[in-house]
C-alpha cells in the first residue's frame, strides 16, 4: 500500500520514478476513492477537494547570451541563416549598412551615415546627427577621355579615407556601363590620401591562414548597365546571385514619381529611383536625391532606404553593398553628364 501511495503521489506531482528532487516536507497524500462496483483493476478516483500541495514551479530558463534585438524574421537569426557575411567578417554583424542611409557631402567626396529620426513637435531642439560610418571617395576626372587607373567610386570600411577598401566602381569610358567590385573583407589596400594622386594600388586579397579550408578569398564583380531611352537611360540593371542560391537574379533601378522618403526637416521629396527585384516585382530599396549633386552648398546629397518585406530578409550583405554602389554610380554618372553638357554649350 505504501508503494502504491508513493506512485500515486509521483503521478499527481508530475514526475516519474527517475526524477531526482529534494525531499519536500511530508504532506498527506490525496485520498483515493473506493470503486463503486468493487471490481479490481478499475482506475481509482482522486479527491480533488482534498488539500494537496500545488505542482512545483520550475524557474524560467534564461540564456546567458545578451538579447539580440533585430527587425529580421526569427528564422533568419538561427545558425543556419541564409544570410552570409563576407569572408572573415564574422566579427561584423549583419546588416553592416544601416537600413536608412543619408549621404553627406565632404568636398567632392561623400560620407555615409544612418538617417536621423524625424523631429517631433515636442522636441525643443534638433536631435544630434548620427555619426558617419563610411567614407566614399569620388574620382573627379577633368575630361571624360582622360583615363586614370583609379576607380571612379571607392567605398571604405569606415569613416576614414585611409581605411581599407570595401568596394569600388570602374566606369567604362566608351559606354554608360560600370563594373562594381566587391572586395573580400580584410583585403589589403593602399588608397591615396590625395584624391588627385595617381599612386593607387588595387586591393589585394587577405593572406590565407594555415587553418583555413583552402578556399581563396574572391573578388566579385557585377556589371551595371543602362537600358532603354534614346538620349538618357530609363533604368539601370545588374545581376547578382543571392546567398545559398545558384540562380542569378536581376535587379533594376527605375525612376519613380511618388513621395516616398521623408527628409530631416519633415518634408517629403518627390521623385527618385526605386530598386526592383525583377523575379518578384518587389521594391527592395528606394532613393531620393536632394537637389543638385554638384551643389556644394548643400550638405545632404540624398537619402536611401532598404525596404522590409517577407522575402527581403535573405538578400545578404553583398547585395546591400551592390545596391548602395549602384545608386552612387547612377548619381555620379548623371552629375558627369550634366557637367559634360554644360561644357559642350559653354555654360559654367
Image (cartoon, helix red, strand yellow):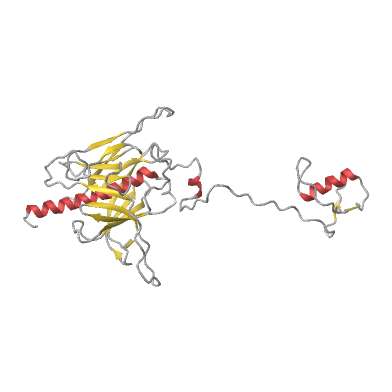
The x and y percentages for residue 223 are 26, 40
Q: Identify the residue shown where x is 10% and y is 55%.
A: 342
- Quarter of the image where the N terminus is located: top right
Q: Nearer the viewer, residue 325 or 57?
A: 57
The x and y percentages for residue 331 are 23, 52
The x and y percentages for residue 323 are 32, 48
Left or right: residue 145 versus residue 14 is: left
- Residue 233 visible somewhere in the drawing: no
Identify whether 287 is placed above or below 119. above
- Quarter of the image where the C terminus is located: bottom left
Q: Residue furthest left?
A: 346
Q: How many marks?
A: 0
Q: Residue furthest right?
A: 38
Left or right: residue 246 versus residue 295 is: right
The x and y percentages for residue 10 are 80, 47
Identify whether 270 is placed above or below 245. below
Left or right: residue 338 versus residue 206 is: left
Q: Identify the residue shown where x is 28% and y is 49%.
A: 135
- Residue 148 visible somewhere in the drawing: yes
Identify whether 247 is placed above or below 29. above
Q: Nearer the viewer, residue 222 or 229?
A: 222
Amino acid at each position: 500500500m505504501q508503494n502504491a501511495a508513493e506512485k500515486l503521489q509521483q503521478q499527481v506531482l508530475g514526475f516519474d520514478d527517475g526524477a531526482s528532487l529534494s525531499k519536500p516536507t511530508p504532506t498527506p497524500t490525496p485520498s483515493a476513492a473506493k470503486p463503486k462496483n468493487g471490481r479490481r483493476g478499475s482506475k481509482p478516483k482522486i479527491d480533488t477537494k482534498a488539500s494537496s500541495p500545488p505542482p512545483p514551479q520550475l524557474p524560467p530558463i534564461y540564456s546567458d547570451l545578451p538579447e539580440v534585438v533585430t527587425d529580421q524574421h526569427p528564422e533568419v537569426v538561427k545558425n543556419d541563416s541564409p544570410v552570409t557575411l563576407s569572408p572573415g567578417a564574422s566579427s561584423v554583424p549583419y546588416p553592416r549598412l544601416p537600413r536608412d542611409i543619408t549621404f553627406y557631402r565632404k568636398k567632392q567626396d561623400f560620407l555615409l551615415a544612418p538617417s536621423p529620426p524625424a523631429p517631433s513637435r515636442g522636441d525643443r531642439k534638433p536631435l544630434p546627427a548620427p555619426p558617419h560610418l563610411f567614407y566614399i571617395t569620388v574620382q573627379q576626372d577633368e575630361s571624360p577621355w582622360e583615363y586614370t587607373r583609379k576607380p571612379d567610386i571607392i567605398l571604405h570600411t569606415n569613416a576614414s579615407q585611409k581605411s581599407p577598401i570595401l568596394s569600388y566602381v570602374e566606369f567604362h569610358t566608351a559606354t554608360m556601363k560600370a563594373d562594381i567590385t566587391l572586395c573580400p573583407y580584410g583585403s589589403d589596400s593602399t588608397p591615396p590620401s590625395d584624391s588627385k594622386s595617381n599612386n593607387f594600388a588595387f586591393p589585394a586579397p587577405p593572406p590565407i591562414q594555415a587553418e583555413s579550408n583552402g578556399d581563396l578569398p574572391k573578388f566579385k564583380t557585377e556589371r551595371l548597365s543602362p537600358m532603354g531611352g534614346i538620349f538618357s537611360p530609363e533604368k539601370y540593371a545588374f545581376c547578382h546571385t543571392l546567398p545559398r542560391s545558384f540562380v542569378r537574379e536581376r535587379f533594376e533601378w527605375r525612376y519613380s514619381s511618388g513621395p516616398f522618403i521623408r527628409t530631416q526637416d519633415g518634408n517629403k521629396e518627390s521623385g527618385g529611383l526605386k530598386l526592383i527585384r525583377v523575379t518578384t516585382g518587389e521594391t527592395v530599396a528606394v532613393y531620393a536625391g536632394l537637389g543638385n549633386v554638384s551643389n556644394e552648398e548643400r550638405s545632404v546629397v540624398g537619402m536611401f532606404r532598404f525596404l522590409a518585406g517577407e522575402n527581403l530578409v535573405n538578400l545578404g550583405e553583398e547585395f546591400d553593398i551592390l545596391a548602395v554602389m549602384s545608386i552612387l554610380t547612377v548619381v555620379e554618372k548623371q552629375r558627369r553628364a550634366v557637367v559634360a553638357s554644360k561644357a559642350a554649350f559653354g555654360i559654367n
